[in-house]
Amino acid sequence: MSVNTDAVGKSFPSVTYAVGREKVREYALAVGETNPVHLDVAAARAAGYADVVAPPMFAAVYSAPAVGPALFDDDVGINFAMMVHGGQEFRWGPLVVAGDEVTTTAAVKDISERGPMAFYVFESVSTNQRDETVCVGTWTNIVRGS
Amino acid sequence: MPITPGQELPELKVTPDRFLTVRYAGASGDFNPIHIDEEFAKQVGLPGRILHGLWSMAQVARAQTEAAGGPHTLRRLSVQFRGMGVPEQELIVTSTVRELHDGNAIVDTEAQQAGNKIIRKAEAELDLG
């Protein structure tokens, strides 16, 4: 297998995600959060937040609409039948709360191969409406070659 | 409670119920049928529906934030996904503080089900304020 690395450096259109209160609560319940700052507006405000706080891993939700098209891009050329999500990193800035608008831009950070496997690494950078970086994600997908 | 190198953080134990993957699909927007359609999962060679990796990663994240005192403490989390998580089996997150520097704790953490490590070599950075 010889993997095509031409797409390294390619970036994709940014996507803005409006963080909704009920979406945060739905997500928090699905991942088992019990901290009331994620579920109860009064508790969040008592703790000093403007509204319910998105759990840190909610980054997977607000950045997905920007990252998805990068994964499916023809120039990147991932063979989905053989792909697995191999690794993930998030680095967080200020917390995201309901009412925030988070804009994410995704890019191809690296494409490499090791033996029969190709590694596709994407980076997402998410900023809030105050232009603060709330999360940088590194998404590693592994494609087994033939 | 002060956090010190070598210290084990409290284990997080959670058993995803039969319909968890359906709820997480709705909550996250990831409707890949390998997570929600038993027949499809088997057709592509899986034992059955598998957990979303990012749900499992969220359990690793929750273990950290519950130990350290809230969502603001988690500055970074990196994981490698290995094996496959399955519904209706207890998932256990274990975490050990490796070192402290500049008021932050670096934590080695992993998640397993019945001894099968589904997240390994994970590293968290916690701001202890």
Image (cartoon, rainbow, N blue to C red):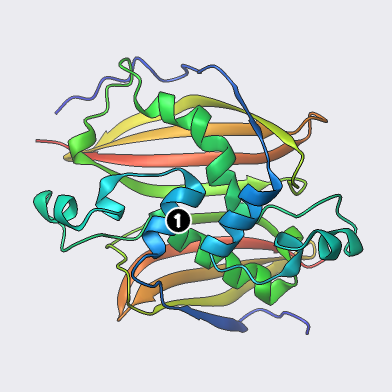
| Residue A121 percent across, percent down from the top left | 41, 34
Q: Quadrant of the C terminus of chain A?
A: top left
Residue type of the residue flagged with mark 1: Tyr
Residue in the picture at 10% in, 50% down:
B43
Image coordinates for residue B5, horizontal then vertical, percent: 66, 78
Q: Secondary structure at mark 1?
A: helix
Give the chain of mark 1.
B
Q: Measuring 50% from the left and 40% from the top, which residue is drawn there?
A: A138
> Between A60 and A116, which is closer to the camera in this rendering?
A60
Q: Give A122 or B87, whichever is nearer the viewer.
A: B87
Q: Residue B78 in the image: x percent, y percent?
A: 51, 54
Residue B91 image position (x, y, % from top left): 40, 76
Left or right of A71? Residue B98 is: right
Image quarter of residue B92: bottom left
Determine if residue B80 is in view. no
Q: Is A142 on the left-hand or right-hand side of A28?
A: left
Q: How many marks?
A: 1
Q: Which residue is mark 1?
A: B24
Check the image and report above or below for A131 versus A45: above
